[in-house]
Amino acid sequence: MSDLDPPSLNCTESEFVEAFRMNGFLSPLIDEAVSGYVFQHREWFDHAAALNNAGLNAFNRRDNEVVGLTSHDPKSLATRMIYRTLSAFQGSLILYRRGMIAEGDTLARNVYEAGFWLGFMHREGDAAVRAFLNDERKSQKSRATYYLDQFENGSYTRNSEIEEQLRVLVAELKSKIVNSDTVSVKMAAERSGLYGYYDAYKHLSASSAHNSLNSLHRYLQSNPDGTYDGHIVGPDPDSLSEALPVLCIGLGIALAIYCTIVAIDDDAELQRLLIKTDTLPRVQTEKPD
């Protein structure tokens, strides 16, 4: 087999299907299939790997510069956020390599969300930090309220000392929560100047993030007459032609803004890759009216 020939499985198609029915994505035959999926989309997979390495290089260049800054400093937050973004990107690629599109899309969604927050932080650093703090206080209040409810409804053994501590914590957090500092992902996209990419985020959310009629519909085998005949399960390598560009565009947005926040303007390789992301061929999908 030459380098131009796609790798082939050491089994028949029926054996592959049966192995998947028995073990799902944990089937060892999926491991064999990976090289074939990557081969079909090698240009984008190679580009994604290069983009990931350039992103890690950008992170490493500014890793130590956050020493001495507060954890709430925009540069400090942005540096932690870009590392989390790169981790989500890597996780998505791992899943895409196995043809797990819906699962990889869930992490790709996180990449876009981070891009919106980085853009918001770049434009309105103080407001973005306040929004982060406000969101954390709301989250802590929700958890504390839940635990307090568990004591009061008898699910937990009553403990007056802990219950009083929780009441004090809830009251303290409630006093610090400011409704005007509450920022949704949509608002972050708008305030970041990246609202044009919000449709990609919503598409990823609708198809992968939550159990919904839309996200579950993809598993139904449709007939031309509108009826259904069983389920569609297994890897979906054909969708990689759309999924990989969307993922790389999302990381490119986040990296470009991160480099602006931390003042990296001399990375020629990263700039080349960001430009290449926009020039690589991709499948055009029709948007609904």
Image (cartoon, rainbow, N blue to C red):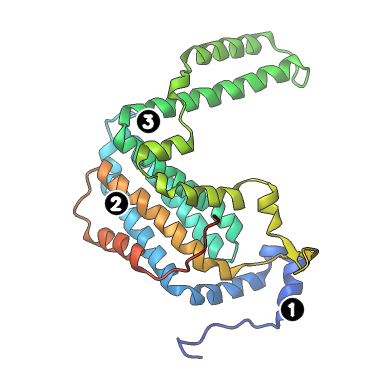
Q: Tell me the residue at 67%/17% (across/down).
A: 148
SS for dot 3: helix
The label on residue 128 is 3
State left or right for residue 254 relative to residue 148: left
Residue 23: image x %, image y %? 73, 65
Precedes in sequence: disc 2 or disc 3: 2
**Residue at image mark 1:** 15
State which tag comes first along the sequence, 1 or 3. 1
Q: Neighbour class for label 1 at 10 Å: few (<14), some, many (≥20)?
A: few
As shown in the figure, which amino acid type bears the numbered disc 2?
A: Ala
Mark pair 1, 3: CA separation: 53 Å
Residue placed most toward the observer, 22 or 89: 89
Tell me the quarter of the picture where residue 233 sits.
bottom right
* Residue drawn 59% across the image and 83% down it: 8
Q: How many marks?
A: 3
Determine the CA span between mark 2 and mark 1: 45 Å
**Residue 95, percent across and down?**
56, 60
Work out which quarter of the rendered image holds the C terminus and state it.
Answer: bottom right
Q: Where is residue 86 drawn, in percent x and y?
A: 42, 51
Q: Is residue 184 left or right of residue 280?
A: right
Residue at far front of view? 289
| The image quarter in which residue 142 lies | top right
Amino acid bearing label 3: Ala
Q: Residues within 10 Å of mark 2 (few under 14, many from 20)?
A: many
Give yes or no for contact between labels 1 and 3 (Cβ–Cβ under 8 Å): no
